Image: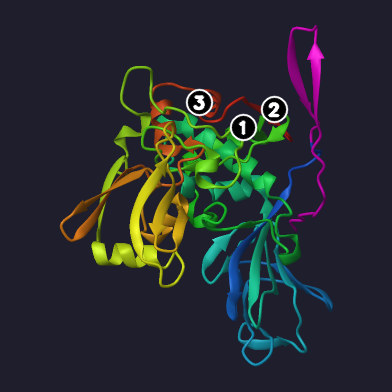
Amino acid sequence: MKKYLSFSILLIVALFSLSGCFNRYIVERWDREPVVKVLVAENVTEVRVSANGSHTVSSSGGSTPIVGPGSWEINNKGGLSVAFNTTEYLTNASLPLKVAPDEHTTLTLNDKAYRGWLAVTPGSASGFNVINMLPLEEYLYGVVPREIPCSEDILAAVEAQAICARSYAIARFGGHRRQGFDVYADTRDQAYGGIAVENKWGTEGVNRTRGLVAFSGEVLLDARYSSTCGGRTANSEDVWSSAIPYLRSTRDAPLFGKPYCAASPYIDWVKEVLKQEFYSVLARSIPSGAKIKSWSLDINPKSKRVVKMIIKSDQGTHEIKGSVLRTAFDLRSTWFKISEKQDVMVFEGHGWGHGVGMCQYGAMEMARRGKSPKKILKHYYKGVWTARLYK
């Protein structure tokens, strides 16, 4: 039977000087690969967990080995009910309920296959959550192909993506401890699709970088990335509140030439919004009853991103953050300008995503040009270096 152990992990990074010439870092190796807890279903009232072979089910009353395949129907309609192969199995059932596969067994949640264990835990109100617990590398098998196209010709970019995804996940261990998980399975953290999305070159990229994570100085990298930067990445504070030293705006192009992400279908985009809708959205972001006199965009001159919109009304001056504008108008990025055209407002922009950190289309083009995973990472993150935490 597979056994995945929970344990707390202490990461120690020590800086020392060698021969007075340059600095190097020592990373204390972990003695085993960590387990990550991924929230794969949130506040649901019924789920079906199936096993294609022998497995063990555990609850507060103990553990029971189940020989052979079967399906668990769990619902919370008028009280928690747990049935195995349509027959009521547990009386006075309580959560958490854990299903652990034997060595050659795979579990599915509502017909979607996952590696590792599945645990049904209390959610909010009357719902419950389902958490997938599995080794970190196996989690990455289901993340990397969801985050970047995976093929042999861009394997260096796939490897860079694997290092970023691994670093990001480790940086968030325990981030939702009270709810019993580490990361979401969607864009609130990293997209994770389980076994169905795994492919040869995504798995190859993960295996080639096993245990490798990225640092800047003595800090584990909060490895942000997005689809298309549009030709220049953004500063962290252009999108979020704090300035992070290694997340600095950088020109995403060779010294002479087009942006690395020029092949992206999202390098340039245009969106038109009816003028009436435009001002209606702005009105919802300022004090009720205020009449708009004028507006202007505050743009970071280096990253080209809209930091905020400044609105002047009969009740004073108001600000709307660029990221809020992006959400309000469903724009691809915060790199845009606005012009008036008869009864519409025209948004002309570049890129897709927040634009901070690695540009995935850019990384793919750099890989095609022969750049190594480390060269790609160094291009997008200032002062980055990598180390292997476990074998």
User: Is tag 1's residue or tag 2's residue first in the polypeptide sequence?
Assistant: 2
**Segment colored magenta:** 1-29
Calculate the distance from the C-alpha at mark 2 to the C-alpha at mark 3. 16 Å
Q: Residue at x 51, y 69 (%)?
A: 111
Relative to residue 309, is residue 278 drawn left or right? left
Calculate the distance from the C-alpha at mark 1 to the C-alpha at mark 2. 10 Å
Q: Position of residue 70 (x, y in %)?
A: 62, 75
Residue 118: name its quadrant. bottom right
User: Is tag 1's residue or tag 3's residue first in the polypeptide sequence?
Assistant: 1
| Residue type for callout 2 | Gly
Whether 267 is among the magenta residues is no
Estimate how packed mark 1 is, as few (under 14), some (14 to 19) or many (20 or more) residues with alpha carbons within 10 Å. few
Out of 9 and 88, give the one closest to the viewer. 9
Q: Position of residue 83 (x, y in %)?
A: 66, 84
Q: Position of residue 299 (x, y in %)?
A: 41, 40
Q: Quadrant of the N terminus?
A: bottom right
Q: Which mark is residue 379?
A: 3
Q: Which mark is residue 217?
A: 2
